[in-house]
Amino acid sequence: MRRRVVLLLLVSVASGGQSLETRIGTGVQRGVDLLLARFDPKAGWGQALGTGTYGNVGRAYPYYAGPTALVCYALLKAGVSPDHKTLRKAFSFLRVKHRTPGVAYEISVELLAVAERAGAQRCPDFRRGALRARRTTHRFKKPKGCPFPTQYWTWMADLAKKLMTFQARNGGWRYYPNDFHSGGRADVSSTQFALLALSTASRCGYDVPDDVFQKARFFLLQSQQKKGREVPRAIHVPGGPEDAVDHARGFPYIAGSDVMPYRRISGGMTAAAVASLLLVREELGSDEQLEQAILDGFAWLGRYFTVRVNPGYQPFLQGSYHFAYLYAVERAGDIARREVIGGRSWFVEGANHLLSIQREDGAFVDATCMNPKDVLGTAFALLFLTRAHRPVTGG
């Protein structure tokens, strides 16, 4: 019934006589056109410019691989052909200048882009049944049935191998290996991108050891609030009681950090952690503790749900990453196959909000993220609007 209601909303919600589905298509195309026009052969889609120093290197964060890989991934998910001349140039830029970047975020998003370019959507799920035995870490010999060209298989394998070496002893990821910068060895944000990347590599046939996901599971469960307000269950669980209750337990950026803002519970980190736990469940299977952590995370999202800000932060606060929060909600909702969280149609509300603030030139500008705000904001908006992490079953 809930799915039927959402489908009716998609058809009936209108602005100027157009259905939401039509408006999404127009908005996505305008965003795609803007990003394609912004590509610079010498700099890709620009530098990710933060305001401080990151990690052990003691310098600002002027890296090119992250924005370019993120835009490549968003454009591919939006339906741009891998053979489009701009994407060909962009992947050449990454391959020649940033084939294996040095920061966990960049490695992760580049792996996602490379896998998508290589044919991840057409790949059978090598985590399932007899296919699991075919997985390999060989750089040149892809598993039988994987559609990747060898050069892209090798590229993805190198990124996956490097990313695994970045995993901290506590099971999470930070910017750099053994990074003690700013109050923590690992953070939920870097961890969720790493798990998205490694789960994709695993699904496409790269043999990521179970121990990697076991350690990540430990880190995520340790990061969740220990107590939370009792609230009605936020997502439908087939066969579950109608009056079920859970405890709204969210996640911070870094639990126990000596930097106070990093301990703030937020929607972005809670959605990212829930999506990460769902990916861990896909790899390792379920257990009672994991299931309750997921349900309690959804309970927090349901209780504090809004699409106008990243809940837990003040509106327009620099560094609150509003659109990245929406993308995290998309990941959690679609991986869990849930259209409603806490009685709210997260996709309909989020899509309407994003489309209402799209600029005339096609950009979705996120004033709360690092520069380039229009490029990064548009990429995250496209990933939300195209349901980029809707579960893939393979060819």
Image (spheres, rainbow, N blue to C red):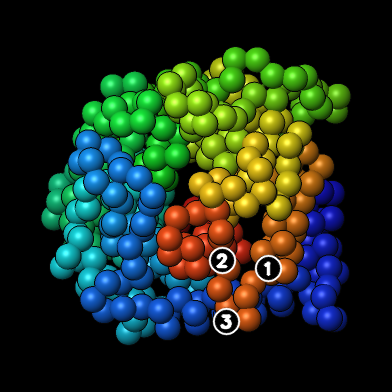
Q: Inspect this view and state whether residue 379 appears.
A: no
Q: Which residue is mark 1?
A: 357
Local secondary structure at mark 2? loop
Residue 258, compared with residue 349, is above or below; it is above
Q: CA distance from mark 3 to mark 2?
A: 11 Å
Q: Which residue is painted at 86% across and 24% down in the image?
A: 243
Please, what is the three-letter code of the amino acid marked with disc 3? Asp
Residue 177's spot in the image, x, y percent? 23, 34
Report the front residue among 89 and 8.
89
Local secondary structure at mark 1? helix
Report the front residue among 234 and 133.
234
Numbered mark located on residue 270 in the image: none
Residue 340, compared with residue 188, is above or below; it is below
Label 3 close to label 2 by CB (< 8 Å): no
Category of crowding for the residue at label 2, using alpha-carbon neighbours closer than 10 angstroms: few (below 14), some (14–19), many (at least 20): many
Q: CA distance from mark 2 to mark 1?
A: 8 Å
Q: Which residue is mark 2?
A: 365
Label 2 close to label 1 by CB (< 8 Å): yes
Please, what is the three-letter code of the amino acid marked with disc 1? Ile
Q: Which residue is mark 3?
A: 361
Please, what is the three-letter code of the amino acid marked with disc 2? Val
Picture quarter with the C terminus:
bottom left
Q: Which residue is painted at 59% across and 24% down in the image?
A: 293
Q: Which residue is painted at 15% across and 68% down in the image?
A: 96
Category of crowding for the residue at label 3, using alpha-carbon neighbours closer than 10 angstroms: few (below 14), some (14–19), many (at least 20): few
Tell whether 393 sits left or right of 349: left
Q: Which residue is painted at 84% across and 81% down in the image?
A: 16
Local secondary structure at mark 3? loop
Q: CA distance from mark 3 to mark 1?
A: 11 Å
Tell whether 280 sits left or right of 385: left
